[in-house]
Amino acid sequence: FNNLVGLNLVFGDIFSWYMIPSFILLAILVGLLSGSYPSFVLASFKPIFALKGNASVKNGTTVLRNALVIIQFSISMIIIAGTLVIYWQFRYMTSKELGFDKEQLVVIERLFPLENQVQVFKDELTNHSSIHTATNSTAYLGAYNNNSSYGIKGRPIEEISPFFVYATDEDFMETFRFELATPESRFFSEEFASDSSACLVNEAAVRKYKLEDPLNQVLLEPSFDGFNKELRIIGVVKDHHFLNLKQEIAAQVITHKNYESGGYITVRLAGGQDNIDAGLKHIDEKWKEFTNDEPLQYFFLDESLNTYYAEEKRTGAVTMIFSILTIFIASLGLFGLTLYNSQKRIREIGIRKVMGATENNIIAIVTKSVIYAVGISILIAMPVAYFMMQDWLRDFPYNVGFQPLLFVISALLAIIIAMVTVTITSLKAARTNPAICLHYE
């Protein structure tokens, strides 16, 4: 349970000194409430009617019973709809196109044992058939990274613009496989020595900071003594989710990494399990060779990205459990209501059977009021579920939106569960011998 909800509950805490009095008080309250209702019902019977054999339950009690079943079933449908929406949103976030290829990417972190041999180590990795490309950067796509405020040449220096900054080498784009937004754009290349003073921005930055004709714009990089380094924009990259789907795509600047140490090395492996195993083995061997057997720390990027949505996965699992419990409780309520209706109308059922009514006719009579209750539950639950789920989805800038199919599925599930429960109960009444029904008092 702790793994499911992400908590660290200890079983021994249940028997702590402050919990035991709470349980005792709760037991007393539940006992009083559960015992008081039958007492009130029995006290309301008038002796004269009871002696005449007319001690039937009042209409008010029937209304209360129906209302409780409606409430139970409404709550069940709200939770079912919520579970479906949460699952759909989780599935959407883990399968949505991110604007780059996250598969077969291995991120090697903690590069300090390599010291100034990062580039040499990277080149050695790519000399293997199971490794397509590798790149060294200050951050990998999908990770939180530092942001910094840049100036824009030609604008007042007070007008600074925040960017998420990625310092990379020439292989960054090929490794992550994102795309350029315009034909005139290009990525860093060893053919251009001037690229050490160049940068790229994403489409979100162009929109946010109104960079008209961005390839003729120059950013001013911050330093300890002001904005004195000019970075010429040589390309615009298509928007991609370089953080995660809980964050809107922000302004991004990609600069050229002009130093060898630090950061991360991201490796793109060839497809197929054999290539993945061979690539990881090669990485491990080269790491030991370069670092004197220091421990290698790496992870697969797609698995790391999915951890951002662990909370939604836990929420979906918990609501699934609660939906099963509420369905079970609501089914018990329907079972009791149907049984009560059939017993209340047992003589009527016997007379109708004598007059030639079929089992289907009897089932329809017994279940009619219950079906009305389920219909009312649907009318109550669907709007409530819609507004609750819309409010929950607002926390996600990229979400599944309103999905009518999910609410239709929720209603159909509720109807199927209700029909199965009610039919099983009413079928017993429909098959009762008419002679027994007519002798029932």
Image (spheres, grey):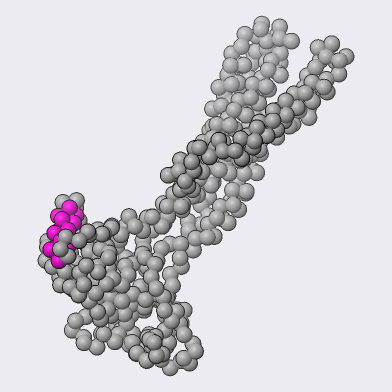
Q: Is residue 354 above or below residue 341?
A: above
Residue 20 appears left or right of 284: right
So how many labels did they put on this image? 0
Q: Which of 36 and 69 is in front in this view?
A: 36
Residue at left 31%, top 80%?
255
Seen as rendered, the residue at the extreme right is: 48
Residue 365 placement: quadrant: top right
The quarter of the picture where residue 3 lies is top left
| Nearer the observer, 434 or 111 | 111
What kind of secondary structure does the magenta stretch mostly adopt? helix
The answer to if 287 sits in the magenta stretch is yes
**Residue 388 forms part of the magenta stretch:** no
Q: Where is residue 192 in the image (x, y as percent from the top left)?
A: 21, 86
In the displayed structure, 117 sits above or below 292; it is below
Residue placed at 28% from the left, 57% from the top?
Answer: 300
Residue at position x 31%, y 67% in the image: 140
Can the viewer see residue 186 in this picture? no
**Residue depicted at x 65% and y 44%:** 380
Position above or below: 72 against 316: above
**Left-right relation of 429 to 101:** right
Q: In which quarter of the image is the C terminus?
A: top right
| Rendering coords of residue 270 (x, y %) | 18, 59
Question: Where is residue 189 shown, x and y percent of the image?
Answer: 21, 80
Vertical side of 22 occupied by 269: above or below:
below
Q: Where is residue 26 in the image (x, y as percent from the top left)?
A: 66, 34
198 horizontally vs 8: left or right: left
Q: Which residues fall within the magenta stretch?
A: 276-290
Q: Can residue 376 be seen in this view?
A: yes
